[in-house]
Amino acid sequence: MTSFPLTRRRLLGTGAAALGAASVFAPSRLWAQSAVSLQLSWLHSVQFGGSYIAQNRGFWSDNGLEVSLLPGGPNAPVEPPVVSGTALVGISAADYTAAAVEEGAPFKILGVAMQKNPFVVASLPENPVNEPADLVGKRIGMALANTPILEALCTLNDVDINDIEIVPTQYSAQPLLAGEVDCLLCWETDLPVAMAVEGVESITMLLADYGYAVHSQTYIATEDSLANRREELVALMRGEVMAWDAYRADTDAAAELTLEMYPDAGLDIEAQRMQAERQVPLMFSELTEANGFGWWTDETVAANIETLALLGRDVSPDLWDRSILEEVHGS
Amino acid sequence: MSMAASWTGTSLWRIQASRARALPGLVVLLIGWELAARLLTDAFVLAGPTEVLAYLVEDRALMARALGETLTNAAFGFVIGNVAAIALAAVALAWPRAERVVTGLALLVFCLPLVATGPILRVLYGPGAGPQVTLAALAVYYTTLIPLLVGLRAAPSSWFDLVRSYGRGRFATLVHVRAMASLPYFFAGLQIAAPAAFLGAMVGEFTGAERGMGVLTVQAIRALDVEMTWGLATVATAVSILAYIAIGALGRRVLLDAPPVILAAPAGASRGRLAAWVDAGLVTLIAVGAWWLALLAFGLNPFFAKGPGDVFAALVLDDDAAETRAALAAALGETALFLIPGYLAGLLAGAGLAVLLILVPMIASSAMPLAIALRSVPIVTTAPLVVLLLGRGAVGTIVLVAVMVFFPTFVASLHGLRQAPGQIMDVFDSYAAGPVTRLLRVRIPAMLPAFFAAARMAVPASVLAVTVVEWLATGNGIGSLMAISASLSDYDMLWSSVVLVSVLSALGYAAVGAVERRILGTYAPEQLA
């Protein structure tokens, strides 16, 4: 694998800027703070509620780490800032990470926030999609870029994709409500929540319940960081683990904190509360109960590799590196 | 200055200035909007003015903060972009041999698709407003540069002779003749630039920002918050219209002289084909060199920053080069089906409406606000509405492209129509020629240089529009291919797309230029000198 030199000037620059900001806003500390960035995969919302708790309650600063949370967006791929060292860790998903690795990026997955992939097929109660077989004869609204996901679901459940009419839509629930489509391929935690806030109850079929095993909201870092910046990675992941446990204990508080920290993001408290609650079952399972937040086993990795193969990605198990998480959980 | 009086008294200036006469048009617009919103309540696509107003009052603090952020970035980008345009025009003028190379390079940079430049700018700048300001500047510099270059030549040769007869040099010509002649064109450029800068700053926020109108737009569309979506669109539109009116008012204070009669001798033998090929070669060479040097200078990581060699390998040398080429060709073909009809329709509508306004000044009061509003409503919010009304087929995309092309063409054509020299209009007056005759014989020929400048500018603008619509709304063509390539880290494909889109835009621009030279050779030969 090729090695990718970090641009040190940029790293130092970011660090200096973050330190400058930290010295203004944070109480002075006696020990040296190391400054790093966490690149989020989307605009600020309670989707990253744990990270906000970690920052707000000092889970990172108590461990000598100052973390800047960099927002993502529709035109903000996570991989370039992580590869170039602007961000120490990025929030990605196994399929995107696998694609980047195929293109030569030296990424490893350090932790898995969403044990179950959040993709669902959302439909309305009068014309429901309760299981994959119900998709036959339906019009599904989705981004064409997500076609491989639908193909994988169909293959896993013996449904002929040609029996489904794909309607290219942008990421909004509007086509479903306007009756242009019968169902949508979206996330459990966004469009169904938006509809619920507008008073429309929807039925969601979680792809993860029908064999679609792709780790989502995964923490990625470069091999170089894993080799040379372990302490910072451990401190960052330790903060995340503590914070997401706190998030689980009180999701309403996480939603309120999100609005408090990011008043300019245009978020609705009701929607944030609902989203915060809905992502809990995706993030916590018997597996995390037994081993702690972010965990995976050889079995779940094997299931991921199988699904990723259906998506056209050839992945080896060493894409996942559990060493940081093992240090955090002390196993 | 009797001509000055007659020119400044031209009905359009007065109509634009008179708010009283614009009111009925605005009222009709608002009533139509409210009715449409009531009809479409269940579709979740459109909020009426009453709902929008209620929303804006309720969330005024949030909206004010977002507007402050985006407007600041847009204003910085506007200033930087326009200063850059003036500097480039100065280079082209001081060194005429370089003009085609300067405009060629400027065109290539202007054609770089947002989808690709956004993430790279974000990595270059890190967190902050860098990409927003840069994208706003990139969105405006070219639409100012081209009218400026046209305007700098829009003076009668007798004026140049006059300066020379006083023994003064090129600098005096620049200050006393060219700069003055270029002002109307410059202000037309600035007017077009204002909404473009705002849109650029909004799209810049898509690369990862904490606050701003673009951030809120994405949030509102996802949250199915129609009131917020249209509240944002209304504010963006209002700001763009105000900027347009303010620049127009400034222009009226500065521009006191009537446009001159330009009776130029037919152009001599223009520079040959060889020179054109040399220029094209130089542009390519400099562009490739600058690209390569920039990657080196910024130390960008080769995982996502691909150089000329990488793209050549991806398109020609690699094992899967044929596959890459096929994917690109298919996407480009799909895009062309939307782009070309939309481009032509936009040109036709823009010039057509400008002509109509000259013939029937009455309609200006309702047409002007509508025209500015159409162009200023951010394409990200209009896309779902247009798609709902016209279906998800080709028509929706074509209309959106036409809207983007329409407004600059309309503004430029209107300015051009107004450039009809007073003396010639007086001659036609004395023969009691009707408005149609005057239009055909004086105004339209006077309009042609500005129209063609707009038609050339519209090439990259339409490419920008079609790729943004494909990226954000329809999910097909080259715009979508670029977005998918970026999300799947297929940066070879992304950069290859960028190169192809830029080169094809430049070729389209050259084709329009060729048509322009043939027609201006008859009607405005001074532009060819």
Image (spheres, coloured by chain):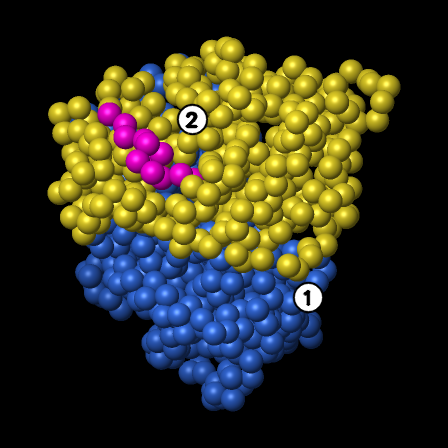
Is A4 positioned to the left or the right of B518 in the image? right
Is B331 positioned to the left or the right of B317 in the image? left
Q: The blue chain is which one?
A: B
Q: Badge 2 local density, few (<14 within 10 Å), some, or many (20+)?
A: some
Is B228 positioned to the left or the right of A224 in the image? left
For this rendering, which residue is in front, A243 or B274? A243
Res B482 → quadrant: bottom left
Chain part drawn in magenta? A203-215
In what element is the residue under mark 1?
helix
Query: Is residue A214 within the magenta segment?
Result: yes
Q: Position of residue B375 (x, y in %)?
A: 35, 45
Residue A171 makes an appearance in the image: no
- Residue tagged 2: A282
Q: Residue B293 carries which label?
A: 1
Residue at image position (61%, 41%) is A321
Considering only vertical position in the picture, is B132 above or below B112?
Answer: above
In what element is the residue under mark 2?
helix
Q: Which chain is yellow?
A: A
Query: Is residue B294 within the magenta segment?
Result: no
- Specify the amino acid type for callout 1: Leu
Residue at image position (65%, 67%) is B292
| Chain letter behind tag 2 | A
Residue at image position (22%, 49%) is A161
How many discs mark residues in the rendered view? 2
Between disc 1 and disc 2, the foreground one is 2
Res B301 → quadrant: bottom right
The verdict on a common chain for dots 1 and 2 is no
Considering only vertical position in the picture, is A248 above or below B208?
Answer: above
